[in-house]
Image (cartoon, rainbow, N blue to C red):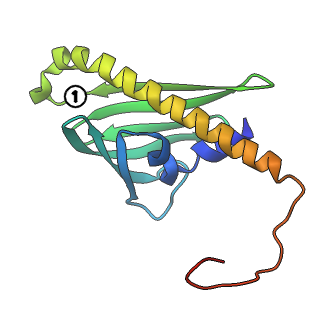
Amino acid sequence: MADTWAYVQDIARHDEWMQDAVGIEFTTDRTSGVGTRFEVETRIGPFRTTDEMTVTEWVEQQSIGVEHAGLVSGKGRFTLVDLGDRTTFQWAEDLILPWWFGGRLGELIARPILRFVWRRNLRNLKRRVERSTAAAQETEGLTPGALIAQGRDGD
């Protein structure tokens, strides 16, 4: 569970696994914890918007809750459940689309599309966490040596 939390708590990296998130920009000095605010440039098909988000809940190793503002409003929450040998990642969103998107009818139409996008995002998250965990296990007990070179080609 610690590996999953380590990856998910880094909000700046959410656009690595959320394919609908084009970019994330923090609007507060803080980048974690309750009160953190950030904007997410979001794209689903031809639709683009900037989602203004505020972290409303932060329980270490357990959950992150957010409030959405802007064209799309509502609330979302990630919850991690430790099952011993694995972690269940739960993602719930309660969003309200703008009136010009068709109100409740538009929400009914968008629901299966968003469900598809979020399930794909969860598969991406799973792959990334598993890949980073495997890489950490391969190098367990090893520490980097002294810096041998530096410059344009790398450190």
> Along the horizontal axis of the image, is 91 left or right of 7?
left
Number of numbered discs: 1
Q: State the residue lying farthest toward the front.
A: 153
Q: Mark 1 is on which residue type?
A: Leu
Q: Nearer the viewer, residue 29 or 40?
A: 40
Residue 101 location (% of width, % of height) = 13, 27
Q: Quadrant of residue 82?
A: top right
The answer to which image quadrant residue 25 occupies is bottom left
Which residue is farthest left?
Answer: 100
Under circle 1, the secondary element is loop
The residue labelled by disc 1 is: 97
Residue 98 shown left or right of residue 123 in the figure:
left
Tell me if 147 is positioned left or right of 37 in this view: right
Looking at the rendered image, the quarter that the C terminus falls into is bottom right
Image point (50%, 60%), residue name: 30
Q: Is residue 113 above or below residue 47?
A: above
Q: Position of residue 79 (x, y in %)?
A: 59, 29
**92 w.r.t. 3: above or below:** above
Q: Residue at x 15, y 21 (%)?
A: 103
Q: Can the viewer see residue 127 in this picture?
A: yes
